[in-house]
Image: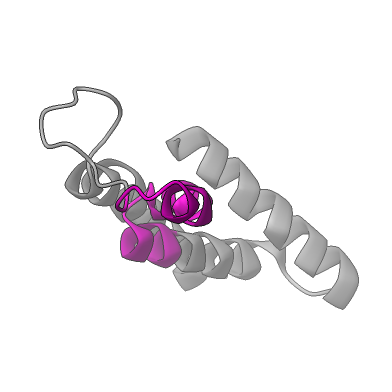
């Protein structure tokens, strides 16, 4: 998830830099920090759960909440610590040097 998120941020920064021109490094830092903020706010799985809300409501089932001991993937705290925080720190370093 960290590698995919970093790659997505760098691609977005590359497109931004190609369209607008200017330095790539500061734009990459901003893109990584914005992506880290979005991942931090959503908890990592909120966007994927949102796609099934209408189907579950149609079938009369309640919202799909994460089970605390499911053992699959990262929890919201894990996404924050191991994905969002490193992305934000690297983005801050890149932005500061731009």
Quarter of the view holding residue 83: top left
Residue lying farthest to the top in this orientation: 71
Kindly report the secondary structure that dominates the magenta region of the rendered protein: helix
Range of residues picked out in magenta: 36-63
Residue that protrudes farthest toward the right in the picture: 19
* Residue 49 included in the magenta stretch of the image: yes
Q: Is residue 55 visible?
A: yes
Q: Is residue 87 above or below residue 28?
A: above
> Is residue 58 shown left or right of residue 8?
left
Q: Position of residue 77 (x, y in %)?
A: 18, 48
Residue 55, magenta (yes or no): yes
In the foreground, 10 or 77: 77
* Res. 92 in view: no
Location of the N terminus (image quadrant): top left
In front: 65, or 57?
57
What residue is at 17 percent from the left and 36 percent from the top? 67
* Residue at image coords 61%, 61%: 28
Percent of width and height locating residue 98: 57, 70
* Residue at (46, 60) in percent of width and height: 91
Comparing 38 with 25, the one in front is 38
Q: Residue at x 55, y 37 (%)?
A: 4
In the rendered image of this protein, does residue 40 appear above or below residue 45?
Answer: below
Relative to 98, does residue 45 appear above or below in the rendering? above
Q: In the drawing, does residue 34 fall left or right of residue 10?
A: left
């Amino acid at each position: 998830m960290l590698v995919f998120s970093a790659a997505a941020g760098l691609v977005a920064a590359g497109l931004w830099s190609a369209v607008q021109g200017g330095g790539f490094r500061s734009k990459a830092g901003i893109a990584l920090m914005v992506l880290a903020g979005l991942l931090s706010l959503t908890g990592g799985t909120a966007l994927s759960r949102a796609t099934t809300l209408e189907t579950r409501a149609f079938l009369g089932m309640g919202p799909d909440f994460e089970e605390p001991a499911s053992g699959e993937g990262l929890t919201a705290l894990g996404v924050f610590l191991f994905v969002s925080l490193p992305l934000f720190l690297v983005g801050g370093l890149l932005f500061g040097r731009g």
